[in-house]
Image (cartoon, grey):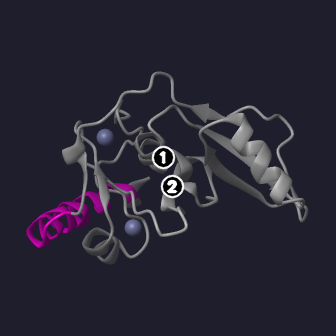
């Protein structure tokens, strides 16, 4: 299986990970022009969006990297953050300055290397039609394809 060069995923229908139907119906999506994968690109009033939430693994963070890139319109990186209790989380930032200001605000968290584990090699913009709400019909088709594809996920 190949990794999509545009959205860094092996699977083209693996996202949304949680409550997929609800996310597809109610949140703006980034639509990969290469594999067709949809990535939540919802931004709330305070500017928070799914791609910036702390993730529990590097693999999950990679699934959201493309959405972060197009919202920030620049290259981004995934950093490993450690909590005081030893728990590790993975978070996307569009610069080391952003990482630093996050660490300043979250004194219980550290990032020893300050180097991304994975980052955008060459940023490419997207067409405006790739960032939008999708229709009810498109949701149904996507969900159907997702159910088909999910058989492959379990084999892993
Ligand atoms: Zn969503
Ligand atoms: Zn893709």
Closer to the camera in the image, 61 or 93:
93
User: Secondary structure under badge 2?
Assistant: helix
Tell me where residue 55 appears, x and y as whole percent.
Answer: 61, 58
Q: Is residue 136 magenta?
A: yes
Outermost residue on the front side: it is 45
- From the viewer's perspective, tell me whether residue 72 is left or right of residue 124: right
**73 lies above or below 140:** above
**Mark 1 — residue?**
68
Q: Is residue 141 magenta?
A: yes
Closer to the camera in the image, 146 or 96:
96
| Label 2 – label 1 distance at C-alpha | 6 Å
Closer to the camera in the image, 153 or 45:
45
Closer to the camera in the image, 72 or 63:
72
Label 2 packing within 10 angstroms: few (<14), some (14-19), many (20+): many
At x 13%, y 67%, the residue is: 135
Indicate the quadrant containing the N terminus: top left, top right, bottom left or bottom right. top left
At x 49%, y 70%, the residue is: 45
Q: Quadrant of residue 153?
A: bottom left
Q: Is residue 112 visible?
A: yes
Our reading of the magenta stretch's main secondary structure is helix
Tell me where residue 141 appears, x and y as whole percent.
Answer: 12, 64
Q: Is residue 36 visible?
A: no
At x 32%, y 55%, the residue is: 152
- Range of the magenta residues? 134-153
**Mark 2 — residue?**
51
């Amino acid at each position: 299986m190949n990794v999509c060069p545009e959205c860094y995923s092996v699977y083209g229908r693996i996202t949304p990970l949680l409550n997929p139907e609800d996310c597809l119906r109610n949140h703006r999506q980034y639509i990969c022009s290469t594999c067709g994968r949809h990535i939540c690109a919802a931004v709330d009033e305070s500017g928070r969006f799914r791609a910036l939430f702390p993730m529990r693994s590097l693999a999950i963070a990679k699934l959201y990297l493309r959405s972060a890139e197009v919202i920030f319109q620049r290259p981004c990186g995934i950093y490993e953050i450690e909590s005081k209790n030893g728990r590790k989380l993975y978070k996307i930032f569009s610069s080391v300055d952003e990482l630093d200001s996050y660490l300043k605000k979250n004194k219980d968290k550290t990032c020893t290397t300050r180097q991304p584990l994975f980052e955008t090699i060459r940023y490419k913009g997207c067409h405006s039609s790739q960032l939008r709400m999708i229709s009810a019909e498109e949701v149904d088709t996507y969900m159907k394809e997702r159910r088909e594809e999910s058989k492959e996920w379990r084999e892993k």
